[in-house]
Image (cartoon, rainbow, N blue to C red):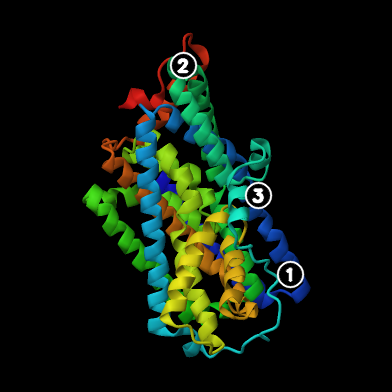
Amino acid sequence: MKSKLTLWIFVGMALGILTGHLSHDHLAPDTRKAFSENITLLTEIFLRLIKMLIAPLVFCTLTVGIGRMDNLGSIGRVGLKSLGWFIIASLFSLTVGMILANLWQPGLAMNLPLPDAHAASGIKGSAINLKDFVTHLVPRSIVEAMANNEILPIAVFAIFFGVAASTMGEAARPVLDWLEAFSHIILRMANYVMAFAPFAGFASLAHIISDEGPGVLAIYARFIGEVYVGFVIIWALLIGAGSLFLGRRVFRLLAHMRTPMAISFSTSSSEAAYPSLLLGLERFGVNPKIANFVLPMGYSFNLDGAMLFATFSILFIAQAYHIPLGLGQQITMLLLLMITSKGVAGIPRAIFAVMAATLPVFHLPEAGLLLILGIDHILDMGRATTNAIGNSVAAASIAAWEGQLGPETADELVRATADAHAADLLLSDPPPSGLASSRR
């Protein structure tokens, strides 16, 4: 079932490229514009369907994951390991982007016509200060955070809620059981939504090729190719790091991640793959307590693809405008991006907002962003896929590190067990123990 969905996603992408090509070459400009605007409705509907599931799913899974942990010490230990992993992975991604940009000098090699240095990019830069980060981190209202689909504030509330539940023991078990049953219902809804993914991938590529034409791929082929080489290097580093904990099983993990990766790539959204990623990790054998804890944190703190893209693109802009940046300035830029990127999780085109705020710090023209805005959709596909790979490897590796990685489970068994347990939770009295504990 999952392999068929992956196949249909790629079929949809191929048809999208062909449809966009035909639209760009054969439709009148007004008709083409209307077609491009209307076709994006398919992608927008799919992303909205996914986003309506993300907030309740993150809250339920993270709360249950923490609430079912044996003690506060294990919560702190897993949290520290997760943050350590994410920081190191982000630093590696930033460094790879910096090394490749200095090695290939893409801004000089492409010799593109430059926008006026004083032109506005239309992107609002995110303020770089501790106050904004902290106020975004701590939700004013959990209802508001859920309404805005802000993962980081939801995660903070869920962590407090889960910790409080874990200290109450048996008294909190009915609530945790109910939340776990609720999360299974959300995951079943996600399975229905995933059937729409091939259409979203089709519409996404049809839109960009219809607007820009297939020629955009040729004009920026070198830049796109170099960024994707960087993504592949990050994939290799992540797989190598994962193999230290998973051994050869890391390749089985990638097999389980085929569908989430295809969804991320075709829709340019790692968020869209969240439910599928969660199920894939459980099928791989990751204890749900670990997956439910690490994955939401990864979506806020582990932006491997975005980190590489940011350093590569900023240095590309500096080179294009012939503004040299010394090694010290580049290292400062890495640290700045490392910090500021954590405060804009969940914001559309978040990495562009961070870059727009970073460029003036080094006296680089914001107009340079206009050089890459036209091809951002193509690059975003790789960023989203890299983020999905990074989060899945992190969750599986931390599970192995904690001794919480079991054998792989067949898709049918996972589905049947989840459905049966969800029904038991809703019908039985008193509530039975959670699915996570029944599997281990």
- Can see residue 163? yes
Callout 3 secondary element: helix
> How many other residues sit within 10 Å of disc 2, few (<14), some (14-19) or many (≥20)?
some
Tell which tag, 1 or 3, sits nearer the viewer.
3
Q: Which one is in front, 151 or 197?
A: 151
Residue in the image at 45% along x and 69% along y: 334
- The residue furthest top is 429
Residue in the image at 40% along x and 39% along y: 291
Residue in the image at 44% along x and 85% along y: 105
Relative to 88, does residue 227 appear above or below in the rendering? Answer: below
Looking at the picture, which amino acid does disc 1 mark? Lys
Relative to 115, does residue 279 appear above or below in the rendering? Answer: above
Name the N-terminal-most of marks 1 and 3. Answer: 1
Callout 1 secondary element: helix
Q: Which residue is mark 3?
A: 45
Residue 5, percent from left and from top: 46, 48
Q: Tag on residue 297?
A: none
Total numbered circles = 3
Q: Tag on residue 424?
A: 2
Callout 2 secondary element: helix
> How many other residues sit within 10 Å of disc 1, few (<14), some (14-19) or many (≥20)?
some
Q: Tag on residue 33?
A: 1
Looking at the picture, which amino acid does disc 2 mark? Asp
Name the N-terminal-most of marks 1 and 2. Answer: 1
- The residue furthest left is 247
Residue in the image at 78% along x and 72% along y: 30
Distance between the Cα atoms at labels 2 and 3? 33 Å
Q: Write down the quadrant of residue 96 in the picture.
A: bottom left
Say if mark 2 contacts mark 3, CB within 8 Å: no
